[in-house]
Image (cartoon, rainbow, N blue to C red):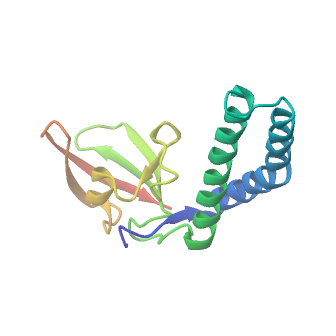
Amino acid sequence: MDQNKLYITKERKKELEAELDVLISQERTRIAGELQSAKELGDLKENAEYHQAREDQAVLEERIRVIQYTLKEGEIITGGHKTEVTIGAFVTISKKGSSIKNEYQIVGSDEANPAEGKLSFDSPLVSAMLGKVEGEFFSFETPAGDTMDYKVVAIK
C-alpha cells in the first residue's frame, strides 16, 4: 500500500458525490444570493454581511475542490483479501490472553473513525497487522511505549 495514495470506500465515494451535488446545485446558489443581497446594502468596506458571505464562499469552494480532488484521485477500495489483512478488509482481532474481540474495517485515512470501527491503514495498529493472516499474532507499540500483543481472529 502506498502511504501517499488516497483510498476511499465505495460508500464514501457515494457520500462525497451526493455532498458535491448539493454544494454545487444548492449552496453555490444560496451564497451567490447572500452576496448579491449584501452588495445591495452599500459600502462593501464596512459591510459585515458581504465579508461573511465572501468567507462562506471561500470555504464552500475549498470544500468543493477537496471533494473533486478526492473523487478524481482516490482509489476505490474493495473488501480486501479474505486471506490476509489489507486495506478494505474487515478484521477481527483480540488481545493476547483475552476473549474480547474487536472488529475493524481497514480504510483510507480520510475515512478513519475509530468510534465507527474504521481504522486508517497507516495507523500504527493497522500497520502492525497488515499482511497478517487468520490465527497470526502481531505486536503493536502504543504511543506510551507499551507493547501489546494481538491475534488476528478473522478476516472478511
Residue shown at 76%/50% (left/top)?
23
Residue shown at 25%/58% (left/top)?
128
Res 130 quadrant in image: bottom left
Q: Is residue 95 above or below residue 136?
A: above
Q: In this view, does 146 lie above or below 49?
A: below
Q: Where is residue 4 in the image (x, y as percent from the top left)?
A: 38, 68
Q: Where is residue 82 in the image (x, y as percent from the top left)?
A: 47, 69
* Left or right position of 9 against 139: right
Res 76 quadrant in image: bottom right
Q: Position of residue 1 (x, y in %)?
A: 37, 72
Q: In this view, does 62 lie above or below 50?
A: below
* Left or right position of 118 against 25: left
Q: Position of residue 113 (x, y in %)?
A: 49, 43
Res 8 quadrant in image: bottom right
Q: Which of 90 and 14 is in front in this view?
A: 14
- Count of numbered circles in the view: 0
Residue shown at 20%/41% (left/top)?
142
Q: Nearer the viewer, residue 146 or 112?
A: 112
Q: Nearer the viewer, residue 44 or 27?
A: 44
